[in-house]
Image: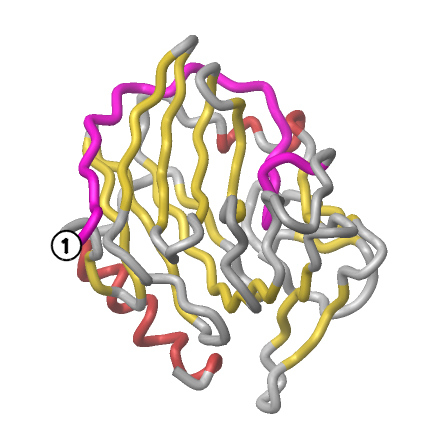
Amino acid sequence: SLSEGIGSVTYDVAKPHHTCTLHGATIAWGALANGTPYVDLTPTTPDWIDCPAADTSDLDFTAGDFSMAIWVNPDNLPPSGFGLLFRGLSATDGWRFDVDNTGRVFVATFQAAAEQLSISTNWIVAVGEWRLISISRNGSSIRIYSNGIDRLSGPNSLVGNHINPASANRDLRIGIINPGFVDPDFNEGINGKIGRLPRIWGKALSAEEHHELWNCERKAFNV
């Protein structure tokens, strides 16, 4: 959980503690008028946050359930979309949670030469707006939420059958997919803001819990 508001290192407030590092020439802390802190990232630098593989072995989800949540406010939706949370390698191992150029949210799980994909309906991430984007995996089912509402139905959505991801010994990336990829017209990092509390749980939150999380935190982001 991003919590300090200064410096290039941030510490998770949950156990086991995960020390995350802020990277990039333009990444910066900011705060809303009410004091709620956030991190502002620019993809062309590129800016991103990561935590080493050795420190995130508890996030190497395979057979178990998991949930994730992140407040996000992008300045734009680039042609290739951008990463939210990613620990793995496409069509190899691990998992991926990101946004496409229409504001749809993608969740993918990977094995060797295979992937399973679920995609939300359109525009659940919107330019210039704070939204809480969250997901749960329960068995082979994944649900996607925006501001506490299930968005895995409607235009252009896709419901995947998520078999167990292959074990991944890889860094956790926040706000980007591939830190080495720099192109102002085609990038994989967010141009915008991430709230101070990205969270990952080793359990499946219920629909009611996703809504309660949003309802408890919405005032902090003026939603």
Image vertical order of residue 140 relative to residue 77, above or below: above
Q: Nearer the viewer, residue 27 or 104?
A: 104
Residue 181 in percent (x, y) is at 70, 36
Can the viewer see residue 84?
Answer: no
> Residue at label 1?
154
* Foreground pick, 106 / 6: 106
Q: Which residues are magenta?
A: 155-179
| Residue shown at 42% from the left, 15% from the top | 166
Q: Judge whether 64 appears above or below 92 on screen.
A: below
User: Residue 26's spot in the image, x, y percent?
Assistant: 80, 61
The quarter holding residue 32 reads bottom right
Q: Nearer the viewer, residue 1 or 30?
A: 30
The prevailing secondary structure element of the residues shown in magenta is: loop
40, above or below 170, in the image? below
The kind of secondary structure element at disc 1 is loop
Q: Amino acid at mark 1?
A: Gly
User: At 59% across and 19% down in the image, what residue appears?
Assistant: 169
Any magenta on residue 162?
A: yes
79 relative position to 51: left or right: left
- Residue 72 x, y percent position in the rendering: 49, 64
Q: Is residue 61 left or right of residue 46?
A: left
